[in-house]
Image (tube, rainbow, N blue to C red):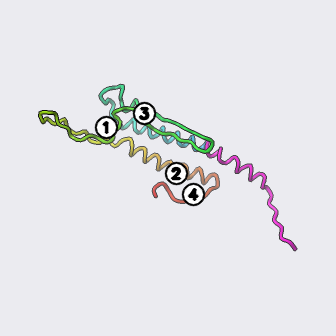
Amino acid sequence: MPAQLTIDGLTELGDQLARLPAELQAEARAITLRRATQAMTRMRARYPERTGDDKKSLRNRLKIKTEESQFSASAIVVNTSPLAAIFEFGTQARHKALGASTGAMPAGHVFIPIAVEERRAMYNDDFRALLEKAGLTVEGSADG
């Protein structure tokens, strides 16, 4: 007697698989935007209130840039202030022509640590939960 295999619901499964990327993309877009907004709020709270020229204020120049396609979504926090890198990384001591020290500015370490924490939490918590809710198995983590 020949072997026979009957699969009921194959059409429905195909329909569900076809919708999965769009549904995941929409939820991923919301997750990335939420985490970027949270990171920007935390950064804004940690930056000093006044940083010389208010037009270059570290707090006021934080922005979120978003991009999306059919299968992806991204939200990137940027600081457009020309002082952002100087504040984040600090400066070395400088000396005037007559030898007077202008001092060194210590690194602020605000933007990068917060961005790393939020991205790690987004991968380990939010995206993992999203994929597991969709019925996928997730192994590993953003920690290595």
CB within 8 Å, label 2 to label 3: no
Would residue 20 be counted in the magenta stretch? yes
The vertical placement of 87 against 138, above or below, is above
Q: Nearer the viewer, residue 74 or 38?
A: 74
User: How many neighbours does mark 3 have within 10 angstroms: few (below 14), some (14-19), or many (20 or more)?
Assistant: some
Label for residue 62? Answer: 3
Which residue appears farthest toward the right when viewing the image?
1
How far apart, in angstroms, are the residues tagged by discs 2 and 3?
A: 25 Å
- Separation of marks 4 and 1 at Cα, in angstroms: 39 Å
What residue is shown with label 2?
125
State the residue position of label 1: 86
Front disc: 4 or 1 = 1
Residue under the image location 43 percent in, 48 percent down: 117
Looking at the picture, how far across and down is residue 67, in whole percent? 55, 38
- Please, what secondary structure does the residue beneath circle 1 have? helix
> Within 10 Å of the Cα at label 1, are there few (<14), some (14-19), or many (20+) other Cα atoms?
some
- Residue at left offset 46%, top offset 46%: 118
Looking at the magenta stretch, what is its main secondary structure? helix
Q: Position of residue 21 (x, y in %)?
A: 65, 47
Identified by mark 2, the residue type is: Asp
> Mark 4 touching mark 3, by CB under 8 A?
no
As measured in the structure, the alpha-carbon distance from the residue carrying label 4 to the one carrying label 3 is 33 Å
Return the disc, 4 or 1, that comes first in the chain's sequence: 1
Residue 6 sits above or below residue 126 on the image: below
Q: CA distance from mark 2 to mark 1?
A: 32 Å
The local secondary structure at tag 2 comes to helix
* Mark 3 vs mark 1: in front: 1
Q: Residue 58's image quarter?
A: top left
